């Protein structure tokens, strides 16, 4: 059975073209080691709550910065990447337990990732990545607001397609987790 060419072209045009990148969903080893070294600097465990509640599942579909067209549409897991990394950092430092008496509520006011990539190689590779995060945090004893920002560009050939964007998510997430620990009573030092 042959599909008419017109039907095939219409189906492809309607589906758009999306790029799927192999993002990392855990802290980089150096950041994970920093979190582990903070163990015991604050009382724990804590329960971690996100507002909106679906932020840890958030995936944005967007194009690369400065590029117009559906060919560059990529699934960017901003919420998943940040929430997973913050949880991992706090888990290593103080422990995270949904039934803990002390609840840390992170209200996400803005979370934005942007990127630029090149498809000139055999595979698309993120060349520049940026992340901006603005939150209100309530740890049960105090409330505060903070903004975090990280930006990076590729320097040489990255070992993975997404190293630059994964790196900015590591920086933003670790900065937020450090602030939470500092407020909980520990004083983790920034690297």
Image (cartoon, rainbow, N blue to C red):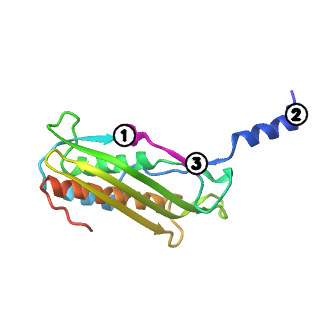
In the picture, the disc for residue 52 is 1
| In the image, residue 169 lies in the stretch drawn in magenta | no
> Residue visible at 35% across and 48% down?
108
State the separation of the CA atoms marked 1 and 2: 46 Å
The residue tagged with tag 2: helix, strand or loop?
A: loop
The part of the chain drawn in magenta is 53-62
> Residue visible at 40% across and 52% down?
110
Q: Are marks 1 and 2 in contact (CB under 8 Å)?
A: no
Among the 4 quarters of the image, the one containing residue 63: bottom right
Residue 108 in sight: yes
The residue tagged with tag 1: helix, strand or loop?
A: loop
The residue that disc 2 covers is 4
- Give neighbour class at mark 3: few <14, some 14-19, many 20+ (Cα, 10 Å): few
Work out whether mark 1 precedes mark 3 in sequence or the reverse, and give the earlier one. 3
> Residue visible at 41% across and 59% down?
132
Q: Do the residues labelled 1 and 3 touch (CB within 8 Å)?
A: no
């Amino acid at each position: 059975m042959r599909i008419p060419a017109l039907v095939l072209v219409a189906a492809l045009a309607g589906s758009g073209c999306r790029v799927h990148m192999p993002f990392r969903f855990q802290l980089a080893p150096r950041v994970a080691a920093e979190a582990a070294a903070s163990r015991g600097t604050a009382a724990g465990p804590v329960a971690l709550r996100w507002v909106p509640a679906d932020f840890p599942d958030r995936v944005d579909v967007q194009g690369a910065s400065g590029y117009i067209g559906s060919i560059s549409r990529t699934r960017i897991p901003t919420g998943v990447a940040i929430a997973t990394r913050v949880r991992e950092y706090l888990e290593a430092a103080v422990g995270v337990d949904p039934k803990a008496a002390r609840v840390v509520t992170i209200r996400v006011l803005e979370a934005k990732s942007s990127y630029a990539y090149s498809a000139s190689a055999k595979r698309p590779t993120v060349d520049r990545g940026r992340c901006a995060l603005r939150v209100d945090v309530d740890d049960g004893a105090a409330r505060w607001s903070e903004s975090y920002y990280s930006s990076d560009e590729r320097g040489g050939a990255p070992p993975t397609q997404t190293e630059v964007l994964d790196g900015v998510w590591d920086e933003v997430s670790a900065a937020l987790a450090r602030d939470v620990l500092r407020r909980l009573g520990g004083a983790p030092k920034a690297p």
